[in-house]
Image (tube, coloured by chain):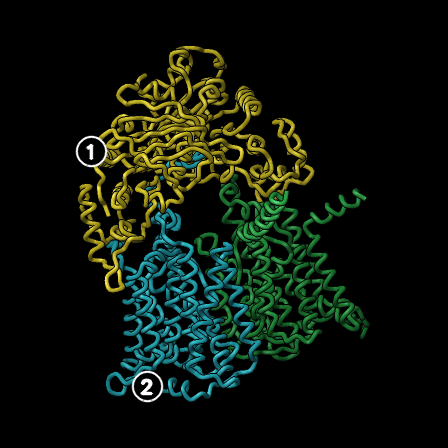
Chain colours: A cyan, B yellow, C green
Amino acid sequence: MKKLQLRSKYTSLYITIALFFLLFAVGSVKYKGFFSLQTFLNLFIDNSFTIVAATGMTLVLIIGGIDISVGSVIALTCMLSAYLLEIKNFNPVLVMILMVLMGAAFGLVQGCLIHFFKLQPFIVTLSGLFFARGMTAVISTDTINIKNKLYSDIANYRIYIIGKSFISIGVVIALIVMLMAIYIAHFTKFGRTVYAIGGNEQSAILMGLPVGRTKVLVYTFSGTCYGIAGIVFSFYMLSGYTLHAQGAEMDAIASAVIGGTPLTGGTGYIFGTLFGVLIQGIIQTLIMFQGTLSSWWTRIAVAFILCLFIVIQRLLTIRREIRNTSKTAVDRGIKASSV
Amino acid sequence: MGEKSYMAKNDIILEMRGICKTFPGVRALASVDFKLRAGEVHALMGENGAGKSTLIKVLTGVEKPDDGEIFLNGRPIVVKSPLHAQELGISTVYQEVNLCPNLSVAENFIIGREPIRFGKINWKEINKRAEQALSRLDLNIDVTQPLGNYSVAIQQMVAIARALDLSAKVLILDEPTSSLDKNEAEKLFTVMRRLKSEGLGIIFVTHFLDQVYAVSDRITVLRNGELVGEYEVASLPKVQLVAKMIGKDLDVLSSFKKGRRAAPDIDQDSTFISIKGLGHAGTINPFDLEIKKGEVLGLAGLLGSGRTETARVIFGIDKADSGEIWIQGKKMSLSSPRDAIKNGIALCPEDRKKEGIIGDLTVRENIILALQAKKGIAKYLSRKEQERIADRYIELLNIKTAGTEQLVKNLSGGNQQKVILARWLVTEPDLLILDEPTRGIDIGTKTEIQKLIIELAEKGLAVMFISSEMDESLRCCTRMAVFRDRVKIGELSGDELTDSTIMKTIAGEA
Amino acid sequence: MSELKDKLKRLMKMRLFWPIVTLLAVLIFDTIFIKGFLAIEIKNGNLYGRLIDIINRASSLMILAVGMTLVIATGGIDISVGSTVAISGAIVVQLLGAGETANTPFYVCIILALLVSVILGAWNGFLVAKIGVQPVVATLILMVAGRGIAQLITNGQIPTTQHKPFSYIAGFLPGLPLPFSIFIVVAVLIIIGLIVKKTAFGLFVESVGVNATASRFTGIAVQRVIFLTYAISGLCAGIAGLMISSMIKAADSNNAGYLIEMDAILAVAIGGNSTSGGRFSIAASVIGASIIQCLTTTLYALGVSPEVLPVVKALVVVAICLMQSEAFHHMISGIFSRKRRLQHEKVAVEI
């Protein structure tokens, strides 16, 4: 494949972007009314919380970890917000701040368990998933509708861009978070350390980088993202419900993987993740326009594409490994006998 | 930043005195001294268990010495961590080039010390500095590309550039040429010579004999954790160096034949395995080999000469990318251990702990495992049968265990080795490959194993025997293939099987 | 006296000791604090009672735990079992139809449901063993997509069925006093037990879990072994799915097996199996499943709201993992040795 020999850093990113435009083109051709700016903007509006969550997930994947507690933290955030707003009559701004802090605390605890006690990320975050889902139901098994004025105002507010086309405040939040994450990833020492650890943790340690601190901080950062995603989600849904955001973890992971972040870590572009989210959104839109397929097909289609990307990534990795062993072979005799 | 301290040549930059380090059950270093002068390339050499790696780990702060002192420029220092070592001016470029292949060249060069302007990393300046540093080493590449896109040779240069930028006074190169070809190694030597002319002190840890002589000024030899001596390269001929590393006094030996096996009657037509041009890129160059039934073929050579790699490619762990294997006259493709085992080959690997024993399983389970794997999932050996086999081999090999149900991880090293040996003998192989089977084992058990190997060969088993101990090899082997620097350079048999001939062949002076 | 101590020590070392003791402790607690806990009565020739109830509900969990034990033993994980449960139930109920007579022959429905479950498990096994995807991600895909598939099978509805033989699965087979689910569990345990103990499969699974590299060098077909564990886990989930949908005589694609993955993993961990793989004991996991069910019943009976359970379970899993973690041991022993050292210093000063 010529593309492989191109060896550009951005190859997979280009493929993802191309795929998105391809899908958009297909929809425009097939369905009347598809081709409009609002259709494009709706992708952002309907998936703004996924953009935020997937941004956090991207960094976790880059460092070589995994976090499947996403959906549950979002649901917990929604439910807790609804509870505090409607039942305890908290100030809405205070609630928002508390939710961000809660997300951060959640991530911090998970990060500490993973790093200091060397527990496997999947089991820690799986426990996090159940803990958060459980707490959501503990707060209330019934739906709590958010009637708070600030929240509904924010939810209904339309920011007009061109003519009648608009976006929501949630989109603005999502884009701000995304830009901040890009800045952190590419222009701060913390971000570069994340990439370094994902590339080769042993090397990072030997180079004297603050590996432990960074690992804990990454999970804290992603937890914060999930808290923010929860806030955005609560604007979108204006309710707390135990089954909110089910499967959001797969959406987040799929967005990152389709966007070019491999599960093995070391590389990844948050900008690519954005397109991963958009691709998921467009699949959902296509299905909606089609009219007859149930919305469950979206999940299945996304799962299928995720599988495809994972398999391709694995095959590429295997091919790269074979190519590299002929050049970077390590003398096993020496290693085994190091006293 | 990178201020070069111009020391007068031959001033001692680094001195280690009386360094001792003991790990549980193993005495790694016993009062070792080491001196490094400014402007010299000082090779650190030693065989298995000599203590090279430990000495370097002590110097770089990975391990703390139990006793001894380190002086840098005359001042006593205590190295607390790898980061601290870097700050003191002791930089290391590791064998595996411990950088991050996913990051750009420039980033690997600078990471940890990125210049920040207005709260954000200044990439333009980083790229500029990296380019400048690399061009000093005669390397002009695109520093924005991921490091992994470049060959190991170039990656190493980046690692060296990074080390120098950290204002190194002492540069440690740990097995830098393991993954380089001849031209790349030459380029590295050119850089080393230039650096040493600028007053840098370089510690060159390696086992490649020719390279040591090509670029080093002095050599320090360690053996069994002790200092054998420090020598000037110009006044130490290769053969003597080999002798000092292996532990033989060359003058005494000559053609002393004691302990060598009488050549047994081997049926010339009973070739079990015939190998032509088998090689695996990067680990072992194509070689020819033939082993007959009843033979014990030894692989001789220094550490890292490619013997283990030879075993691995024959056993199918590494897939050969050239050559052919013929077993009992039939051409075979051995692309996995299962293939090799099906064809009657068995391997006792070098790294007992990682590749040999299944620690949490019992002695019985470990012993019958290979046979069971051969029989498949369905045909399970009955418990009684398993115990019978296990008991038989525990007695046969004199394995000291509290019964068949003891967990293998609780046995001593020697007995673990015997369990692995038993495991393979149960499968009644035609070719048994033993990679350092007596390493780390007491004298008594060593002798037992050696006797067993000879007995098995006499019964018709073909054996490939890899050992770093000359005595042992001479006692057991009827023929030897000699390896150096990943190439098979020759074979010795009959009267040629003496310490001195072997060492001369290794050194290239036979 | 010391002979008794020795016997006790040896008993404690037995792998099933602590799980059994825990189970007995919970049962004793229940007997004391819950009125009529041990009461069993016979109605229409069938046994009823709290205890019978526990066993009935625990059976699906036990079967899931069996499959999960094998997967975890090789160092993997399967978080898709809940979705497979839903799919299995969806297939069988959808095919049976709403009435008392089956639209499709009963046995065909059952076999199809189980077949699909095995295929799903095999799919997971393929991703993990052959492609090399991390187990958690590979099974996460099915975990999320699976419920969608189940919804598609039932057309987004919650189909019900009145087919009598189907209800026997979670109820009573005419003529047998004990709940049928017990027989299913026993059958599964016997079959899997035979596979694990009477073939080399159990040995190979443990070997791979302890040291996959050395296992490969010994000639074990590591990929095949790992693949089979996921296939078996799929089958177990399928069987559990039949039992769970039979209990409500319906297929609820959203709620069937919801969060049951945690229970299965917890059962394996409580039983004393290591979550990172190696030696395993299916019996221990089964006892673990019983403990979980007893605890659940206890908490319900004490008036604790059921929503708290996932939270408690999550905390217990983390606690068990911590206890298994070496880093945790170091920290604890570090604290104690410091105390001891301080005590020694105090003594030394006093002398």
Residue type at tag 1: Ser
Left or right: C327, with B245 as reference point: right
**With B365 as the anchor, is A30 left or right in this view?**
left
Q: Position of residue B223 (x, y in %)?
A: 42, 25
Q: Mark 2 highlights which residue?
A: A158
Q: Position of residue C316 (x, y in %)?
A: 60, 63
**Badge 2 amino acid:** Arg
Image quarter (top left, top right, bottom left or bottom right) of the C terminus of chain B: top left
Q: Label 1 belongs to which residue?
A: B197
- Residue A138 visible in the displayed image: yes
Q: Position of residue A146 (x, y in %)?
A: 47, 85
Q: Secondary structure at mark 2?
A: loop
Q: Is residue C295 above or below residue B114?
A: below
- Report the number of numbered marks: 2
Nearer to us of marks 2 and 1 is: 1
Query: Residue placed at 61% from the left, 76% from the top?
Result: C250
